[in-house]
Amino acid sequence: MHLKLPILFLSAILGVSVFGGLVFMSLKQAPEAHITITLNRETHHQGDIMTITIENVSNETQCFGNAAYNVCFERFNGGYWEFYDAIPGAEVITCLKPGETGQVTWKLGGHTDRPFPAGHYQVGTKGVYAEFEIIEVELNQAELEKTVTEFLKTRAHV
């Protein structure tokens, strides 16, 4: 009785099967990627426009649950990836035939409630991701003064 619990636990976690007292293990492999994700750049700043290209590299039509190909962002928190944001899209089935590509553009930090601070991110769909970095913009004193002056000029006309 004491051995059944660990074997059942192993069965669920590692793909172990028990037949007549013999233990058989099969390694679970990651699913084959049917799509590829590419980005216009590997480093971005908050407020940049990112272009995400999804290509169907399989021999079968790949369908998605919305017009934005169910694209979502994850952020690395130092230990693991966690959901960060998703690109909203019309809730229509959107398909890519073999060899077809689709593109989504997104302004990073376009939501006032969801900025993209500096850090390590990945963007993807269907378990396939492309990684990128958000880096902070460093302004020197002259650039900062110019930015403030331009902002104040726009406020003077209000």
Image (cartoon, helix red, strand yellow):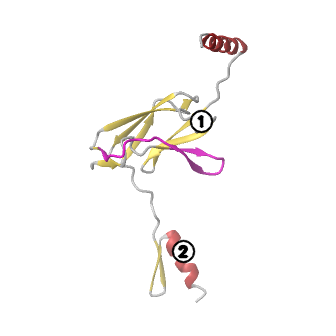
Q: Residue at x 39, y 50 (%)?
A: 33
Residue under numbered circle 1: 115
- Mark 1: secondary structure: loop
Q: Position of residue 125 (x, y in %)?
A: 43, 47
Quadrant in which residue 156 is drawn: top right
Q: Amino acid at mark 1?
A: Pro
Q: Determine which residue is flagged by label 2.
A: 10
Residue farthest toward the bottom in the current orientation of the protein? 1
Q: In the depicted view, which residue is nearer to us: 110 or 14? A: 110
Are dots 1 and 2 in contact, CB under 8 Å?
no
Per the rendering, the mark at residue 66 is none
Magenta residues, as a range? Answer: 73-95
Q: Secondary structure at mark 2?
A: helix
Residue that appears at 52% across and 69% down: 13
Q: Quadrant of the C terminus?
A: top right
Q: Is 85 in the magenta? A: yes
